[in-house]
Image: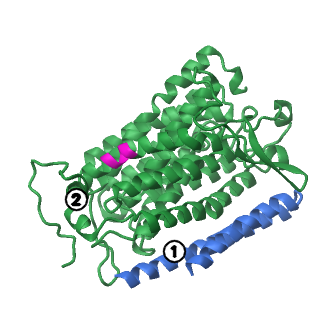
Amino acid sequence: MKIAGFLLLLAGWLLVLSAVVLLPGGSARPAFVLAGIAVEILALVLMFRSHRVLHRSHE
Amino acid sequence: MTVSLLSESGMAFVMLSTLLIPLAIAGLALINAGLGRSRNAGHVMMSCLCVIGVAAGTYFLCGFAWQGTIGGPAHIARVAGTDWNWLAAEPAFFRGVQINGSPASLAVWMQMLAVMLAALIPMGAAAERWRLGAVCASTALLAGITYPLFGHWVWGGGWLAELGVNYGLGHGFVDAGGSATIQVVGGLTALSMAWIMGPRRGKYTSEGMPTAIPGHHAVFVLFGCLMAWAGWLGLNVSGAVLFSGMEPRRAVLVAVNTTFAAGSAALMTLLVTRLRFGKPDASLTANGWVAGLAAGSAGCAFVPPAAGILIGLIAGLLVPFAIENLELRLGIDDPGGAISVHAIGGLWGILALGLFERFPAPVLNTADDLARLTSLSGVGQGLAQLIGVATLIGFVLPLTYGLNWLLNRFVPHRVAPEGERQGLDLYELGAGAYPEFMTHTDEFFQR
């Protein structure tokens, strides 16, 4: 779960970079940047959950 | 106005401003020490001194070579027909800069102080269980890799700063006083350390409920806040002049905004804690104060004073809820509140600049000619700030976590259970910070 979180974080960032490079101005670029950030938020949720589970199992 | 056009009096003013920055470093050190237990106080202060030394040395060794300055030599990749400036190519050991009071040497000096401040932030989250040797090694990673890389992208004329010129996104990513470069980079490293090391022994019961482990010295914490305020004034003024092209005479606006952000944030946190707990909480209010400073840095030179107050109020509102939720719901043990204060406060400050910006003049973010910059409108500034936030979360966080996770394999970050029980002062330093007081057993440990 932790590795999946990491990969999702990077995927979200690459989505943002791709939007900047590939899409012209207009509504498409902001939409894809926001989509990239949404993916990062999802990844953060996964990271927080995986670490909570990890620490519980150590207790 | 470009930095190279600074008058002699302007240079002297910036130099004096940078001399205030060590107060911010000392303030953070005091806050970290005061928010911890007395048996770790000496260790925290000692760690802070080591952080300062290691950060300066590593930055001299290789950090500046990778961060560089605006217009300096850089590695440039061509992507889809556009130049992407991604890493500086300065020689190591400051060999590319004359340390003679030139604008470039002032930028080097200011960056050295900035990297020290950023490296101190993780101490707040990892205190009371972080070995001294590991503190030094982790600081070297931050000062040698993480900070210079992101710092180049923002303050060295890198691709984030050039988003305006290359893609028409406002003035590019703007961070006058270091909300992103210093605060969020430090805050995300603090989050990584809290994740890697886990909570302190006795912080959570077997049912997973957090126990309160109060700090030992409220006066240290609150005096640290006052010192941090003085230091932040210097940090924001010198950052805005050196990296964002602000004219020195506009320093008054920076000072007013910095003070408003800190004051309104502290008052908001005080109000929230008063309403929630019946009495104002000193340590949370101190966290609110620093969160206001962290949030106010990004836009200190480019937002009106009313926006400075609003930025502070929202930062002060965010902090107590962030601290509570991190501890209670997410199982993050952050004794100094570093993640909430620096990472969340800083992220809010970056976004707030996009919402409230009012640029009086072209922002010096790139080496390109000023005529091109003046022709740009402010449209897209919010998007540029969002891209900066996405880069911090999507690139800097995995990078700093990965580096520290790898380091943990060779140099374990966490002290032995006996060291935590005994206190790091005695265990690692061999002497307590307050030897004249009687040492007593800790009621917070489960037996």
Does A29 sit above or below residue A54? Answer: above
Identify the residue position indicated by label 2 in the image: B427
Residue nearer the viewer, A57 or B215: A57
Q: Measuring from the top left, give residue B114's x and y in whole percent.
A: 52, 40
Q: According to the colouring, which chain is green?
A: B
Q: Residue at x 82, y 43 (%)?
A: B165
Using the rendered image of the protein, determine whether residue B162 is visible from the camera's viewpoint. no
Q: Chain of mark 2?
A: B
Q: Which mark is residue B106?
A: none
The amino acid marked with disc number 1 is Phe
**Mark 2 or 1: the one toward you:** 2
Q: Chain of mark 1?
A: A
Identify the residue position indicated by label 1 in the image: A48
Q: Secondary structure at mark 1?
A: helix
Q: Quadrant of the N terminus of chain B?
A: top right
Compute the Cα span from label 2 to label 1. Answer: 31 Å
